[in-house]
Image: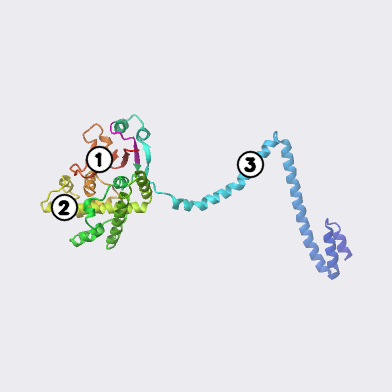
Amino acid sequence: GLAVRQKAVVLPSMLVEVKVASAARSGSGMATLLLNQDINSTVSETKIHSFSQAFSWIIDWTWKKLPNPLIVGIAAIVLSSWFVRAPYKWVVYLLKWPLRIRGKRNISVGPSVDILEYANIEWKGDTKQAEKLRMAYEDIYLLHDIKHMRRIRGDNYCALRAVLFQIFSHGIPLPSWMKEQDITKLPEKIFMHGCNWVQQYNFGPERYTGNNVFGKLRKCLELLQVQWMNFHGIKDQEKRTAMCIKLFSKQENEYKMFEAMKFLMLYTVFELHEGLKDGEDVPGFCSIFFARDSSPDPLSFMMNHLNQIGDTGGLEQIEMFLIGCTFQLKIRTFRLYKHGTEEYVTCYPQDCQREWHEILILTEDDRHYNIPITCE
């Protein structure tokens, strides 16, 4: 016990000596084990203390050698706070990323922009095409008193989006033929007429749906009808426009309404084709429409043209006449690349009736359409 106590004397802690002496009374094995544990612990503390002294010495030496310790000290404090916060910010950003994606709005109709500023940005340069389109926009600005426009997202629903936005934002009422019947029953009506091919209707990129086509079309038609009537009932122009922009920010709903418009166009083709067979008077564009090899009848039109809209293609010019006829609209269109010719301003259809409402659209290539604004 005495030998053990003498070894403990060299340790800096008096507590170790007391513990070892107490353990010596119980047995030399216990004392030796306790002594080894305390020695290891004390050596670790001594190493930590030595490292602290060395680190402090390095900091002190570096501080004395710096030309302006105060500025460096402030910079160190700022940087240290950044290093502490930066990882936290990245973690927060990554956690919020799914919510950002989920809450991201679909911008299909842009805000009002100055039409000349748009032209100068989009068509800057000295090419003949750029100069021609800038002149066309200037003509719209000066001669037609159109100062602003809204950009439309250039997907394959572009033409339908431009037309429907104008209908809703202007509060145009439902066409008379859509008021006189339940349009949600039109798919079954065509089917019962022997046109079972209607089951091959495509909803944009969504392919063949079979018997489900009737239920899906019914929902699309119902949504279009309800929204159309709601917007017609809003008398305040600014409120209508704001609600219209909000509606068109919901991609799923706007796609359903576009599909309803497509089907109503198909129904119009069906009616016009039946009238043509019966010798009835039909609009003038039908002579060109049904003369195409790709659309001599409603089935061919659906398979070769309508099913591609919203998926791989948009509307062709002749189909703009069909839109006007279907929704009883006079669609006055500024075809900017035709500036300086008789086709610069074209109406779809040309033989529209006097009571039909007029809307304005503009295009640079007969594929992508934007909305001119006359009252902002």
Depth check, front residue: 345 or 213: 345
Identify the residue under disc 3. Answer: 78
Residue 240 horizontal/vertical position (percent)? 35, 46
Q: Which stretch appears magenta?
A: 143-150
Q: Residue furthest front?
A: 235
Residue 77 in sight: yes
- Structural distance between the alpha carbons of marks 3 and 2: 77 Å
Q: Residue furthest left?
A: 279
Identify the residue under disc 2. Answer: 273
Who comes first in sequence, dot 1 or dot 3? 3
- Structural distance between the alpha carbons of marks 1 and 2: 25 Å
Residue 201 horizontal/vertical position (percent)? 26, 57
Residue 72 horizontal/vertical position (percent)? 67, 37
Quadrant of the image occupied by residue 371: top left
Q: Residues within 10 Å of mark 2 (few under 14, many from 20)?
A: some
Which element is circle 1 on? strand
- Amino acid beneath label 1: Arg
Which element is circle 2 on? helix
Residue occupying image coordinates x 15% and y 54%? 274
- Structural distance between the alpha carbons of marks 1 and 3: 62 Å
Q: What numbered label is drawn on residue 134?
A: none
Instruction: Assign the C terminus to one quadrant of the image.
Output: top left
Q: Residues within 10 Å of mark 1 (few under 14, many from 20)?
A: some
Q: Nearer the viewer, mark 1 or mark 3?
A: 1
Instruction: Assign the N terminus to one quadrant of the image.
Output: bottom right
Is 147 included in the stretch rendered in magenta? Answer: yes
Residue occupying image coordinates x 26% and y 33%? 339
Residue 301 in sight: no
Identify the residue under disc 1. Answer: 332
Who comes first in sequence, dot 3 or dot 2? 3
